[in-house]
Image (tube, rainbow, N blue to C red):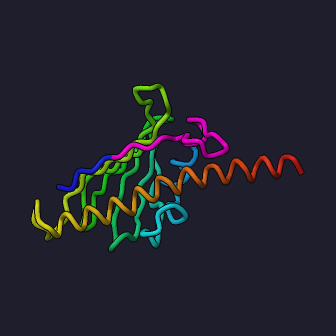
Amino acid sequence: MIDISRTIPINDGIEPPLTVDDVWAGLVEKAENPLPYVAAISACTVVDRFEGGLVRDIEHVGPVREVVTFYPKKLVHFVRTHGAARGTIDNEICVDEAGNDVLKFSFRLVVDGIVEGSAEEAAFGEQMRSDYFDAVHTTLQAVRDRIVGSSTSAAS
């Protein structure tokens, strides 16, 4: 099983500073349309919606189905039910020991045809880590860009 977690500060001196509401809106947007955020995802179709979430089909190293559940302003929980890599991915808004807002990204996946603990599993995990951690940074930047764009439009 590939089990990786990383936490990054939401506000690390980059302007404008983000609120939890700002980040939450970005996480929901990314769940509904990940293409602008995750370079490794080449297609996404929301196939169903339910109270508190959605079901989507994505193309990420092959077809993948994910059930996405929203826990408002706290957690977006993805369960990969179909595809070569199944398991869970979490994007969680937390507060660290110093009282700062952080975004924690975790995934726990089992990959078909890859022996647990093998070099192949490690390589697959590293690629997943790279793709999705980049997406976390991209999400925060996209939220900042939207805030700057909306404040520029409001000033016009």
19 vs 156: above or below: above
Query: Quarter of the image containing the N terminus?
Result: bottom left
Q: Residue 153 location, x and y as percent? A: 82, 52
Along the horizontal axis of the image, is 89 left or right of 144?
A: left
Along the horizontal axis of the image, is 56 left or right of 127?
A: right
How many marks on residues? 0
Residue at 47% from the left image edge and 63% from the top image edge: 38
Along the horizontal axis of the image, is 71 left or right of 80?
A: right
Q: Residue 32 location, x and y as percent? A: 51, 56
The residue closer to the viewer here, 5 or 31, is 5
Dividing the picture into quarters, in which one does residue 113 lie?
bottom left
Q: Residue 115 location, x and y as percent? A: 10, 66
The residue closer to the viewer here, 51 or 80, is 80
Residue at 43% from the left image edge and 68% from the top image edge: 41
Q: Residue 111 location, x and y as percent? A: 20, 64
Evaluate whether residue 89 shows in this view.
yes
Residue at 45% from the left image edge and 59% from the top image edge: 134
Residue at 51% from the left image edge and 66% from the top image edge: 35
Stretch in magenta: 6-24
Evaluate whether residue 69 shows in this view.
no
103 vs 44: above or below: above
Q: Is residue 8 magenta?
A: yes
